[in-house]
Amino acid sequence: MAKTLMIQGTGSGAGKSLIAAAFCRIFRDMGLKVAPFKSQNMALNSHITFDGGEIGRAQALQAEAAGIEPSVDMNPVLLKASGDMGSQVILQGRVHATMKAREYYAFRKEAWEVVKKSYARLVGNYDVIVIEGAGSPAEINLMDVDIVNMAMARHAKAPVLLVGDIDKGGVFASLYGTAKLLGRDSRFIKAFLINKFRGDVEILGPGLEMIRDKTGIPVIGVLPYIHDLGLPEEDGMALYQNARFRRQSGSGAVRIVVVRLKYISNFTDFDPFYHEPDVEILYSTNASDIENADLVILPGTKNTVQDLMLLKEQALDTSVRNAFKKNVMIMGMCGGYQMLGRRIFDPEGIESPHPEVDGIGLLDIETTFGKEKRTRRVEAELMRPPSGREADYTLKGYEIHMGQSTGDIGMFRVKSAAGAPNSGNETPLLDGAINRNCWGTYLHGIFDNDLFRREIINTLRRRKGLAPLEPCSFYAELVGEAIDRLADVVRDNVDMAFIRETMHL
């Protein structure tokens, strides 16, 4: 029977996902076979498993920390908010339905059965399961429909480590209040962990003793605030906490502007650029930023039509066209790719009540939405490089989209990744379009490919009269090193003897 540890938080953004990833790496380093689990995740950042299932990006990162391949059992229920349409409900990696909140709560028993089956499979195959909660377990109006916090702790008989974010202020009140509102379920909370502390930890001493006296629960660790860790964020909250989110770099940097869409999804596609020494990246809805960039990216979105209409309301479609006329490179990924086309059709109302809308018109394609969602890992051959320079390497990425595009398609030749279902007997398909300095694709993850990313940056450098650079940032290695650093911080600042004793390791 697998041992368990559950990470819950006093609220969203407390650091649950990364702390869970740290424990996955710590247990892996102890020689244990460990897997992450989050019964229900609500996030627009998602990951495609090897068999084409869709799960939360955080669980994929935690699986990487554990040294294993992600599976749909690690996140059996994924909710993707789709605006006024409700949320897309994904069960075991596949789209089940789109539901409003009341409909989903009525569906709770069916979802819970899916959760229990996934968890049972993991328990049978691993030594340790690190379980992540969601939001706060003390949302008293939702306790009767809970399948992710204390309902999961009860089912798994899991000891809970409750994380409080001191950077937000009121950490002792939030720890105390959470424990008290949970009533009898507070018995599962075995320890508190304070996260994102800046300053002298000795100042906290009296408070640590008082919170234990008042609740009977010890604080077993105070984690320092970690700057520039370099790991993917769980969702888009970080982008909206600081609307002009950027990384400054040295002189002569190329500037990349990602248009900050309301329903932006999979923005981690652009994280690799943060590690490049000559790149400045900015998320913005400012016309001047867009028109004075070296590269403008329209990212993926969970609601292409609504985000496109919002861009038009702000006249940002005009800004994108103005940038194109100034020879700025324009790139669209997934939903952004659809927006750059001539038209989007939605005759069945799959995504919006608008049967037809005009796109930005920079690519000679049209997109029609249908009920089928394509999710798979892929390998791609670059047929028409944005740089104009021949590419002799294979790109790895993944598809995750609804809608099919037709027209001047043929930038990439795409097939399923080697070893994936049906990879051995399929005909490669064409993807992506290019028109001078504008291009787009359905392929996510292509900037994780170090050679391709550097060639795009070097193309921008050449346009500015700067010499190209050799690849100097290797993203997969950097992520692995960042996970190790995070695990070291947790290991050094948490009472690991308490953890092992509590888990009976």
Image: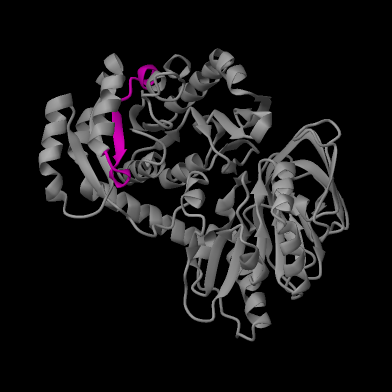
Residue at 69 percent across and 46 percent down: it is 307
- What range is drawn magenta here? 153-170
- From where the camera sits, is residue 46 visible? yes
Q: Using the image as rendered, state which of residue 399 and residue 167 is in the foreground.
A: 167
Q: Position of residue 45 (x, y in %)?
A: 56, 43
Residue at 59 percent across and 18 percent down: it is 102
Residue 52 vs residue 498: left or right?
A: right
Up/down of 18 relative to 379, above or below: above
Q: Position of residue 459 (x, y in %)?
A: 67, 76
Residue at 38 percent across and 39 percent down: it is 16
- 164 falls in the magenta region: yes
Q: Position of residue 128 (x, y in %)?
A: 36, 32
- Which colouring convention does the figure follow? one colour
Up/down of 401 relative to 184, above or below: below
Q: Using the image as rendered, state which of residue 107 and residue 157 is in the foreground.
A: 107
Q: Position of residue 398 (x, y in %)?
A: 66, 48
Up/down of 239 relative to 17, above or below: below
